Image (spheres, rainbow, N blue to C red):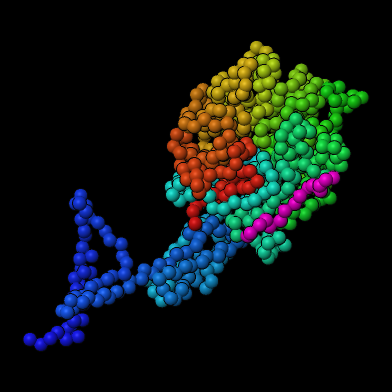
């Protein structure tokens, strides 16, 4: 027999390799009898030579993949989106870009250039489009991403509107299907220089002519105001490193934020109330307080100012800022010669600012509320209105001119206003005489002939007990409901530390009677009530919210509760109750019209962002502790501030940073 030739040896090798590959392709079984799947990798075959030696040959099987970043991208009408593609397993990394299967896209779906820069269509229609990057060397290999064309123009005020509903009904990205720990989480964060008690605000498609980082252009912008007396404007989509612009209202050591120790508090106090934005003039109004020319830690001049900032540059407008000074006739606490002054040392502005224009006003008016920070007299409750163009003080109202206290706190909830520019506020413990002094009351104030006039009020019949126990009505804010069926179409919901829900007729608030409450509903114990003579206080510590016939009230150390309206009335017990007790967060509701509703809340004492089914608070969609390593909210505690939900992102103020959540990239 002839010896095996070299070519025959190769034949044996190939046969052996083929048999090996066939064996690998067949399902293997474990000891339990279950099939095992081998992961693809370099195939190896071994051929045995007749002389006993062996040789090994390898056949490489490269896996070619194409991935696109970002995977999900909300896009507004004036802002482009840069996509990048990564090709692995191929020496040629070039790709061709498509939008909805159209190479380069078109003006109906948006265009994309050879670098992956996507430009939205000139006639933007809310919806989704698919961006695809196809490998030029391997056309059957591609990666995709989703563009969400979004249309929310902005969140300009606390809790989204002057009714303080908490609703954003133009959220087309975030849904019950994609807000879960697998597809939703923390994306990035923005550093800020202090605590943020104010709610962030948002404006889409802002032309920024001279950003601190980058070149002039359009940005979606999110605004943050801090207790260190600063305002930051950041690119809301995280496309720019660092702030677009930043303002500081201090000049140490001569001008500093008010030290907490000087007002019987902790920390520092600068910008506390949520600012308000006028989109018609691109102006943000900010109330800030400072201590100036201090000769020691707490001596010096205490000053409140209203700033009017250009939202595109941060520059002051309309001759601002202006020092806020006011007084009314009266003989109450701190009065001098029959005049009660607005005391810049002890007064603190906490409620979100209100922008409202009555038929008598030539320009919109910026309203602020005030009270002491820690019940330190002398103080009163105040509502002040300043003209949005001249910044001159136009309206002044004091809640207790012949007494004391009666502060307007509302735990940051903004002053509310109806379509006729009537303003509604709640006051804290203080003097009540049902004539000039209205502590522990709900007030309607109306601009009239250059004055802010008390046109209606409601004071609970148990005012003496509430005042004795310091059970403020002003621990929470007010919710103005949309028109309701039934006998009282114009309703309002409020409450305080006692835990009683007040449902009031805005056309007749009910006044005061020591023998009963002349309001639509007085629901005792619906929210965990305070206990007489004991701390801590329970009850309502923020403003209720509304969505699709449901009112959401989350009490202090109580479970989140939902009350479903029926013919303009609330049930006496909650329709749905959550399973985790919290310290009075304010709810924000995002939805696409009536669909895809989500209730968002930021837990105060154990910082957690939550998302719930708006019809069943026992059904949790997401919380930041589900993947704490990736998503946990920074800090031991956060302020009692609602999160901001805008165009597919959720902005959460934390300690010296704002964390941004959205669909994972």
The quarter holding residue 361 reads: top right
Q: Is residue 484 left or right of residue 444?
A: left
- Residue 648 visible: no
State the image coordinates of residue 150 (x, y, percent, origin top left).
Answer: 55, 55
| Residue at image coords 62%, 30% | 541
- Which of these two is toward me, 231 or 391? 231
Tell me the quadrant of the picture where the N terminus can be found: bottom left
Q: Is residue 227 left or right of residue 598?
A: right
| Residue at image coords 45%, 46% | 180
Q: Is residue 233 above or below residue 78?
A: above
From the image, give the main secondary structure of the stretch colored magenta.
Answer: loop
State which region is magenta: 240-254
Q: Is residue 272 left or right of residue 236?
A: right
The quarter holding residue 439 reads: top right
State the image coordinates of residue 476 (x, y, percent, origin top left).
Answer: 64, 30
Q: Is residue 551 above or below residue 467?
A: below
């Amino acid at each position: 027999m002839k010896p095996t030739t070299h070519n025959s040896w190769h034949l044996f090798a190939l046969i052996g390799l083929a048999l090996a590959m066939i064996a690998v392709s067949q399902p293997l079984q474990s000891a339990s009898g279950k099939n095992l799947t081998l992961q693809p990798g370099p195939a190896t075959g071994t051929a045995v030579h007749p002389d006993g030696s062996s040789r090994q040959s390898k056949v490489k099987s490269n896996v070619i993949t194409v991935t696109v970043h970002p995977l999900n991208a909300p896009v507004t009408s004036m802002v482009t989106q840069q996509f990048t593609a990564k090709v692995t397993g191929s020496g040629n990394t070039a790709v061709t870009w498509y939008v909805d299967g159209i190479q380069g896209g078109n003006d109906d779906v948006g265009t994309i250039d050879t670098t992956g820069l996507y430009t939205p269509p000139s006639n933007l229609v809310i919806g989704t489009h698919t961006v695809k990057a196809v490998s030029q060397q391997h056309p059957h290999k591609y990666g995709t991403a989703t563009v969400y064309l979004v249309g929310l123009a902005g969140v300009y005020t606390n809790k989204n509107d002057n009714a303080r509903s908490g609703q954003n009904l133009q959220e087309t990205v975030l849904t019950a299907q994609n807000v879960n720990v697998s597809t939703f989480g923390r994306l990035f964060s923005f550093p800020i220089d202090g605590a943020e008690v104010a709610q962030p605000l948002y404006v889409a498609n802002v032309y920024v002519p001279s950003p601190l980082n980058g070149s002039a252009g359009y940005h979606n912008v999110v605004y943050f105001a801090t207790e260190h007396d600063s305002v930051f404007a950041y690119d809301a989509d995280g496309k720019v490193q660092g702030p677009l612009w930043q303002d500081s209202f201090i000049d140490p050591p001569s001008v500093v934020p008010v030290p907490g120790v000087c007002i019987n508090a902790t920390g520092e106090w600068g910008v506390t109330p949520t600012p308000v934005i006028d989109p018609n003039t691109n102006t943000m109004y900010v109330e800030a307080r400072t201590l100036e020319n201090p000769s020691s830690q707490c001596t010096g001049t205490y000053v409140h100012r209203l700033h009017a900032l250009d939202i595109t540059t941060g520059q002051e407008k309309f001759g601002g800022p202006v020092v806020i000074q006011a007084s009314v006739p009266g003989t109450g606490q701190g009065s001098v010669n029959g005049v009660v002054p607005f005391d810049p040392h002890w007064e603190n502005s906490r409620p979100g600012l209100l922008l409202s224009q009555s038929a008598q006003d030539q320009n919109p008016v910026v309203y602020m509320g005030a009270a002491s920070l820690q019940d330190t007299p002398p103080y009163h409750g105040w509502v002040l209105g300043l003209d949005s163009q001249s910044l001159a003080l136009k309206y002044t109202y004091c809640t207790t001119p012949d007494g004391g206290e009666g502060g307007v706190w509302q735990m940051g909830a903004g002053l509310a206003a109806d379509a006729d520019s009537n303003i509604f506020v709640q006051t804290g413990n203080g003097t009540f005489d049902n004539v000039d002094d209205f502590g522990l009351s709900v007030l309607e104030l109306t601009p009239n002939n250059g004055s802010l006039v008390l046109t209606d009020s409601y004071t609970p019949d148990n005012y003496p007990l509430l005042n004795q126990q310091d059970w403020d009505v002003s621990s929470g804010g007010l919710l103005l409901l949309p028109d309701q069926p039934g006998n009282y179409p114009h309703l309002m919901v409020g409450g305080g530390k006692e835990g009683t829900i007040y449902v009031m007729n805005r056309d007749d608030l009910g006044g005061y009677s020591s023998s009963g409450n002349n309001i639509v509903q007085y629901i005792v114990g619906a929210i965990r009530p305070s206990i007489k003579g004991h701390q801590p206080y329970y009850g309502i510590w923020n403003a209720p919210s509304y969505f699709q016939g449901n009112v959401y009230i989350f009490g202090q150390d109580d479970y989140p509760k939902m009350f479903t309206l029926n013919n303009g009335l609330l049930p006496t017990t909650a329709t749905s109750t959550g399973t985790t007790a919290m310290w009075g967060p304010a709810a924000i509701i995002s939805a696409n019209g009536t669909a895809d509703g989500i209730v968002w809340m930021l837990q105060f004492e154990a910082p957690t962002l939550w998302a719930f089914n708006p019809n069943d608070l026992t059904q949790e969609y997401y919380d930041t502790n589900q993947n704490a390593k990736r998503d946990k909210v920074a800090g031991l505690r956060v302020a009692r501030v609602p999160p901001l939900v805008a165009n597919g992102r959720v902005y959460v103020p934390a300690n010296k940073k704002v964390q941004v959540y959205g669909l994972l990239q």
